[in-house]
Image (spheres, rainbow, N blue to C red):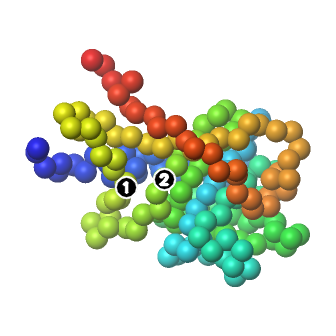
Amino acid sequence: MAKDHFNYPALMDAALRGIVRKVLERTAERGIPGSHHFYISFRTDFPGVEIPDYLREQYPEEITIVLQHQYWGLEVDDDRLAVTLSFRDIHERLVVPWPALTGFADPSVSFGLQFEARPAAADGAAKPRIEAKPKGEAPTSAKMHALPVPAPAGDTPAEDGQAEKPAAKSGEVVTLDAFRKK
C-alpha cells in the first residue's frame, strides 16, 4: 500500500471541526437563528480547557453544554471557542480548544458530529481514530461517527444553559462512499 503523504484522515477531521467552527462563528456574529440550538461536548481534562473547578470535579472527563437561550460573549477563533454560561445562577466563562471537542449536535435539524479529542501532533496535524477495513476493501473512504441526536423539545431543562449529558445511545456509522461518483 502506498504511503499517505497527505494524511487524509487528519484533513477530514480538520474539515469537520471547521464546520463546527464556522457555525459558531456565524452564531457569535448573528445569534442563533430560529429553533437551532447546539449541544457541544468536550473533554474537561484536556490541556487548555478552562472551566470552574466545581464543574471539573462534577465532570472529570467530559461535559456537554447547551447553547440556546442563555449564553453570553461567544468568541470563536482558530484555536478555541469561549462562552459564558449560567451554572447554579452564576455566570461562568468556559474556554475550549478545538482539539478538546468530542461532539457537536444541532437537534433542531438532526445534525451531529462526534470526534475523538486529540492532542496536537508535532506537525500540527490531527491524529483521528481510523477504523480497520475488511481485507480487500479499498482504503479510500474515511468514516465519521454520527452523534446520537436528541429529538427537539419545547421547554427543556437544557435551555437554561445548564450542563447535562445526553442519554447514551449507539451512533450509526456514516460512510462517505455513498456520495462518491462511481
Across and down, in percent, residue 61 comes to 59, 70
Q: Which quarter of the image is occupied by the C terminus?
A: top left
Give the mark nearest the N terminus, 1 or 2.
Answer: 2
Task: Look at the numbered disc 1 and give the secondary structure of its residue.
Answer: loop
Crowding at mark 1 (Cα within 10 Å: few <14, some 14-19, many 20+): some
Q: Which residue is drawn at 46% across and 57% down?
A: 116
Across and down, in percent, residue 57 comes to 69, 79
Snapshot quadrant of residue 153: top right
Across and down, in percent, residue 16 comes to 46, 45
Snapshot quadrant of residue 73: bottom right
- Which amino acid, mark 2? Phe
Query: Which residue is the site of mark 1?
Result: 128
In the rendered view, does 103 fall on the left or right side of 83? left
Snapshot quadrant of residue 2: top left
Crowding at mark 2 (Cα within 10 Å: few <14, some 14-19, many 20+): many
| Distance CA(mark 1)–CA(mark 2) | 8 Å
Vertically, is 30 above or below 161?
above
143 or 137, nearer to the observer:
137
